[in-house]
Image: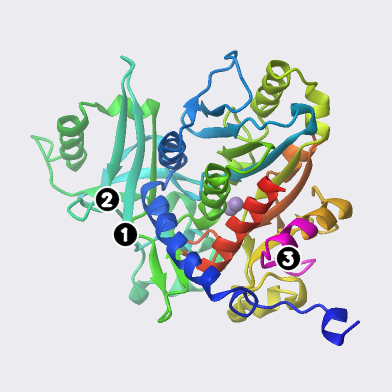
Amino acid sequence: MSNEKLTYKKKTVYENADKAVCDFAFDYAEGYKRYLDGGKTEREALKLSVAMAEAKGFKEYRLGDKINVGDKLYYNNRGKNLFVFSVGTEHINNGIRMTAAHIDAPRIDLKQCPLYEDGGMAFFKTHYYGGIRKYQWVAIPLALHGVIATKDGKVIDVCVGEDENDPLFYINDLLPHLGREQAKLPLSEGIKGEQLNVLVGSIPEGDDVSVKLGVLKLLNQKYGIAEDDFLSAELCVVPAFKARDIGFDRALIGSYGHDDRVCAYPALTALLDSTDTEHTLMCILADKEETGSDGPTGMQCDLMLDIINELARELGGNAAAVRANSKCLSADVSAAYDPNFAEVFEKQNTPLLSCGAVFTKFTGSGGKSSTNDANAEFIGWLRSILAKDRVVWQAGELGKVDIGGGGTVAKYISKHNIETIDLGVPVISMHAPYEVIAKVDLYETYRAICAFYRY
Ligand code: MN
Ligand code: MN
């Protein structure tokens, strides 16, 4: 055996793949950037995903509908969680090739009684969603997204701050001149949750000279709502930045919400592009991953089992056999090695930017607590199919053993006797208002999922 074959060395996609693959990666990234800009919340990402599926001939499925071989279907769960599936020609008992990614992202939600005024300014009170570093969300341009459900059954879509001509929103920060005491605080306490108040207006109205009333009048003109309609609204504040290329060579993309659209997009597009497989395929786009996958739209909900049960019943299979023979890629991001913070990473086992899709055998923290820990035999099989398509990939884990940790939806799928592993794209500045990924890693993840659906 040659020395080169005897030793394993991680290489970048640029060294490993054909020039054509790198060119395709850059083309593929253009569609992804549009998906990022058009889908900043789970509701918006779902709408875009449904449109993409319908354009490829997928039809809406409702529980109880007939299912036949060859069907291309999607199930829309409350506008926040999507199951896209195509029924293959092989027997359903052979299992389903599944992927699961999440389409929610860390952000700042409005409280149910949000509006108040102080110091001549009107603000929204907020309650942050997911693991944000609060200091990163002040003094940046923000947009307001969401829905207002009224008493009379209307659901009003809200999206302000994305159009060039829209106004933006803002969270105030302290000036350095008066920030001496604040600067002594730990990073996690410099900005507190109750300080994340969003500036939304400053022109007073009426005899009371009320700025709050001024804002309410404008909201009433635009949406026909009154203050109590906030009680049944889901409104959130997200960065108003657009996805843009980063670096002179344009190899990276900066954007809000890569985690986890950077996995949702390849999982979905790979399924929509997979026409040469006999397998039944399923792509799950989940909500609430960032808060623990609870609720009826999170991966802990039994809906996945309901749909698998229906597939088994309709196609003359056995649901337990379907699950036992299914395989799942839990598609979620990983932290890329960052030389600015080298001390938290163990370089040999940390994903490197531009070195391809990342397979994470186990997540969790400390002694692998709360992890799925994928089986070696499953990874061996994955290696064989990835080699067939010359996919560039790497093994990775999240930082040094005792430093921290994190989880994904993998364990909520594998607990149903479905072989599962985490796969995803390495991210710089994960959970920041503007995160960075490499186009070649995105594309290799797409190619890895295509191979998984095909073989
Ligand atoms: Mn994620
Ligand atoms: Mn996350």
Magenta highlight range: 384-403
Out of 213 and 35, give the one closest to the viewer.
Answer: 35
Q: Nearer the viewer, mark 1 or mark 2?
A: 2
| Residue contact at pointers 3 and 1, CB within 8 angstroms | no
Which residue is at the far right? 1
* N-terminal-most mark, 3 or 1: 1
Q: Marks 1/2: CA distance?
A: 9 Å
* N-terminal-most mark, 1 or 2: 1
Which residue position is annotated with label 3? Answer: 396
| Residue contact at pointers 3 and 2, CB within 8 angstroms | no
Which residue position is annotated with label 2? Answer: 161
**Could you classify mark 3 by the number of other residues whose Cα lies within 10 Å: few (under 14), some (14-19), or many (20 or more)?**
many
Q: Is residue 400 magenta?
A: yes
Q: Nearer the viewer, mark 3 or mark 1?
A: 3
Which residue position is annotated with label 1? Answer: 141
The amino acid type of the residue labelled 1 equals Pro
| Quadrant in the picture for residue 429 | bottom right
68 left or right, relative to 206: right
Residue 128 position within the rendered picture, expressed as x and y whole percent measured from the top left: 48, 47
Q: Quadrant of the N terminus?
A: bottom right
